[in-house]
Amino acid sequence: MDPTATNTTIYVGRYRYFFQVAAITPAGVGQFTELKNITVTPNIPASPTDLTATGNSQDRTAHLEWKKPDSKVKLYYIYYAWPYSDDTVIGDVKCCNTTLTETTVKDLSPNVTYIFKVTAFNDDGESLQSDPASVTIVGDPLPRPTNLNATPTGFHTIELTWSIDDTSHNWMYGIYYSKSGHYLTEPKEIVNDTKATVPGLESDVLYIFQVGVVGPVGKGPQSIPCVGATQFDPSLQPRDIRARAVDFTTIEVTWRSPRDLPTKLKYKIYYGIPKAGQIEFQAVNVPDTKDTSLAYNITGLIPGAPYTIKLSNGEMTAAMIAKEVNVTTLSSSAPTSLKVFELPRADNDIVGVTLEWTAPDRILNKSLGYAVFMAIGDKPVSWKHQTSSDINVTAIVGLEKNVTYNFKVCTDQYMNYYGEFSDVAQVTLSDTAGSDPHTAHHKKSSKMAAIVAPIIGVVAMLAVALVIFIVRHHRLQRSFTQFANSHYDSRSGTTTFSVEGDGLGEEEDSPMIRGFSDDEPLVVA
């Protein structure tokens, strides 16, 4: 991650956000950047106007008044800042809120100039800050604690010590601390000594501390921040453990250290396969590391086996084990395109089916072959291993008529673990003979032939008739031409018919046929 950039979650219901950044190291907290803000939605109220501040040094208060903006307001937030040093101003600190357009801020420190700002808030978010108004509380300044030190004394405690130059009063001290470095307006602990032990902290967590006078005559300036970390608790559990299958025999385990501080730790990964409700764990040691985000590969596992993973930062005890995760190593992927066909029945009336499928894309070993599982009923519940096959086709016989069968296929088992199952193929066997894919294809071809053959016959007959007509036409044309040439005399224009030669019969009374002239057409009906 880029150490100069981070992502911040925007929470629902708040639409305007303010940001400051400071560097935090074991040596202390650096100076905060300039205050930045972002508007998530424009539907927020306008800023209050005409803010005024009047100080009362006697009771160390400041009275604020302002005008309501021209929009709906549910609440007003009051912020103030004050000089932390000659070149640093602390703020803006949200000190209080009100539903009115005025309020009084109490417990201010004498000889300190406060800068106040007000914002308006409604259901759409918070407005921009108003123009500032300042007030100075007159009086002798309260002392500021110095030489603040933090020393871890246990998994959940840190001891603080500090000094105070002014011993004229029996001062009451407020202890301020947080994990984020945000300046707090109210102390979490109040003591009357320059030494205190802060309890109830988280183990191996970095905290920022400040101390300031809170009585008996007002709230004084806070000390320079001090950073301290609690001791590491070895019983802390690793965080965010995850596991994923990398290949047939490898699982990658990832996790985060119990805390984000770079503490050198030794981790142990426990893994095993559940059998009969029990798990016999094996362990692998991870080399010592200060990394806060870690990953480790467990190798030599069984393909397709379900593993339970546990992780600890030392020897396995109930308090140190992270929440277990379950993961299955990769196995052969599922066969595809499973099809089932009813076998044709001969005189022996054997009832059965043929199964065909496509080999899987990912396979552990082709020599394993395939396993076929079968279940009965429309909604199968109980599956049984039916047969095995070295190739992607097999036949199953001995089934019953009018029964619904379901089939699924996978790569056959390796070390008692099968590959992934295919989709389910279902068939209901009929009373009559079924068909395998070849028989079905033959029947389909026969049907096509029964339709096409008559059509081809009709076309052939039409073609033969056409040929006969053409031949006879040519013969008639040729016979007429020969007849005309033999009986017509173009010189005399007469046509002669011989009774004998023409075969017209011996009729003496046959009339003479008059010839035609050249300019008259010869018409023969």
Image: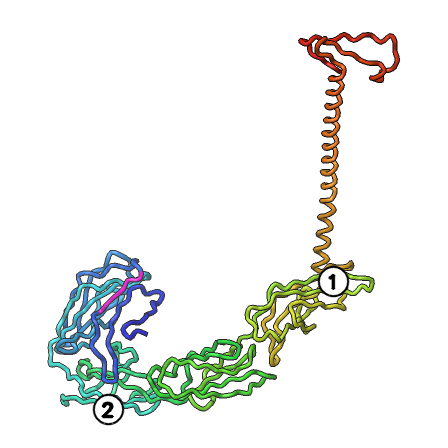
39 in the magenta segment: yes
Please state which of the two labelled residues, at mark 1 or mark 2, is closer to the viewer.
Answer: 1
Q: Looking at the image, which residue is at 51% across and 77% down?
A: 327
Q: Which mark is residue 343?
A: 1
Question: Residue 427 at what x, y percent from top left?
Answer: 69, 62
* Vertical position of residue 335 compared to residue 512: above or below: below
Compare marks 1 and 2 and give the one earlier in the sequence: 2
Figure quadrant of residue 525? top right
Q: Looking at the image, which residue is at 78% across and 12% down?
A: 496
Q: Which residues are magenta?
A: 35-40
Q: Is residue 57 visible?
A: no
The reply to whether the C-beta atoms of the residues labelled 1 and 2 are less than 8 Å apart is: no
Q: Is residue 230 visible?
A: yes
Question: Residue 258 at what x, y percent from top left?
Answer: 39, 83
Figure quadrant of residue 265? bottom left
Q: Is residue 352 left or right of residue 108?
A: right
Magenta span: helix, strand or loop, mainly?
strand
Q: Which mark is residue 195?
A: 2
Q: Is residue 276 left or right of residue 171?
A: right
Label 2 crowd (10 A; few <14 / some 14-19 / many >=20)? some
Name which residue type carries label 1: Leu
Q: Looking at the image, which residue is at 67% across and 9% down?
A: 519
Name which residue type carries label 2: Lys
